[in-house]
Image: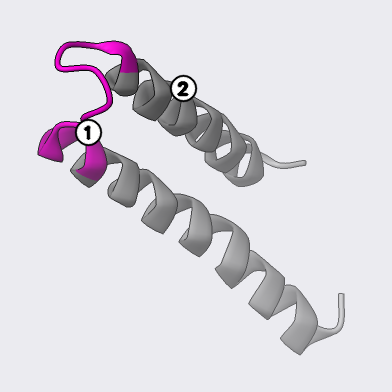
Amino acid sequence: MNIRELTAVAMLIAGVAMAFTALLMPPPGEIHDSVLWIFAQILLYAGSALGIDAYVRKRLGN
């Protein structure tokens, strides 16, 4: 794994942990909009880091 893949996986783990933590904070069961926005940004980064790399590898045949 290279640094791009490691950061994408680490951010996904941190984002899921943050979302579950937000569920436990008052009011319980409600996630604040800022947490959802940050989680969406994490998903965009991970998708681009992993998806673009997979696309390039497929196109180049590596």
Q: Nearer the viewer, residue 33 or 58?
A: 33
Residue 43 location in percent, x, y?
Answer: 42, 51
Residue 19 location in percent, x, y?
Answer: 36, 29
Q: Is residue 35 above or below residue 17?
A: below
Indicate which disc, 1 or 2, sits on the residue closer to the N terminus: 2
Q: For the point 76% across and 75% down, which residue is it?
A: 57
Q: For the point 32% across and 13% down, which residue is it?
A: 24
Residue furthest bottom as drawn:
59
Q: Quadrant of residue 7?
A: top right
Give the number of the disc on residue 59.
Answer: none
Q: Nearer the viewer, residue 59 or 21?
A: 21
Q: Quadrant of the C terminus?
A: bottom right
Report the span colored magenta: 24-36
Q: Main SS of the magenta segment?
A: loop
Q: Secondary structure at mark 2?
A: helix
- Relative to 39, 15 lies left or right: right
Q: Which residue is mark 2?
A: 17
Q: Amino acid at mark 2?
A: Ala
Q: Nearer the viewer, residue 34 or 58?
A: 34
Q: Quadrant of the N terminus?
A: top right
Q: Amino acid at mark 1?
A: Val
Q: Which residue is mark 1?
A: 35
- Relative to 60, 61 lies left or right: right
Give the class, few, some or many, for how many residues have Cα within 10 Å of label 2's Cα (few <14, many ≥20). few
